[in-house]
Image (cartoon, helix red, strand yellow):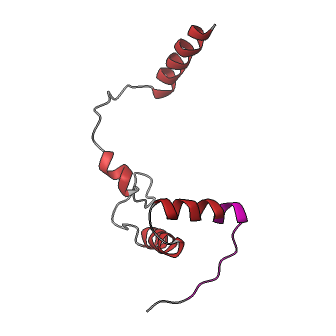
């Protein structure tokens, strides 16, 4: 059974969402429905270390385990090095 739902959303958000839906060849209602299903069907069995329940986005979940990164990898330091290298070349 389908029920009509009225939402109040900023014009720009609606405009961009309609463009996105058209690109994906879906209706805006369908996108909203899929999103609401996704957030309401969270896997209550998966808990993080602190006891917070959270499910990964399916697109992100597919990528989980693809990279083998050392335990001591410091992404902030690595990102800083990359940015320094990039912008020092521009000078």
> Quadrant of the image for the C terminus?
top right
Q: Position of residue 79 (x, y in %)?
A: 50, 24
Residue reaching furthest bottom?
A: 1
The quarter of the displayed image where residue 8 is located: bottom right
Residue drawn at (51%, 16%) of the image:
81
The quarter of the picture where the N terminus appears is bottom left
In the foreground, 48 or 63? 63
Q: Left or right? Give the position of 81 relative to 91.
A: left
Q: Is residue 58 left or right of residue 29?
A: left
Query: Which residues make up the magenta segment?
Result: 4-14
Q: Is residue 75 above or below residue 84?
A: below
Magenta stretch encompasses residue 8: yes
Query: Which residue appears at 61% of the width and 59% of the height?
Result: 16
| Nearer to the camera, 19 or 86 | 19
Point 53% across, 59% down: residue = 20
Can you give x and y, in whole percent of width and height, for residue 27 in the image?
50, 72
């Amino acid at each position: 059974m389908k029920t009509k739902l009225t939402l109040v959303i900023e014009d720009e958000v609606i405009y961009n969402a309609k463009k996105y839906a058209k690109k994906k060849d879906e209706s805006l209602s369908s996108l909203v429905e899929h999103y609401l299903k996704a957030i309401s069907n969270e896997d209550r069995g998966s808990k993080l270390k602190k006891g917070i329940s959270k499910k990964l986005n399916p697109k992100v979940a597919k990528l989980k385990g693809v990279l083998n990164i050392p335990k001591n990898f410091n992404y902030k330091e690595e990102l800083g090095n990359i940015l320094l290298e990039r912008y020092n070349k521009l000078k």
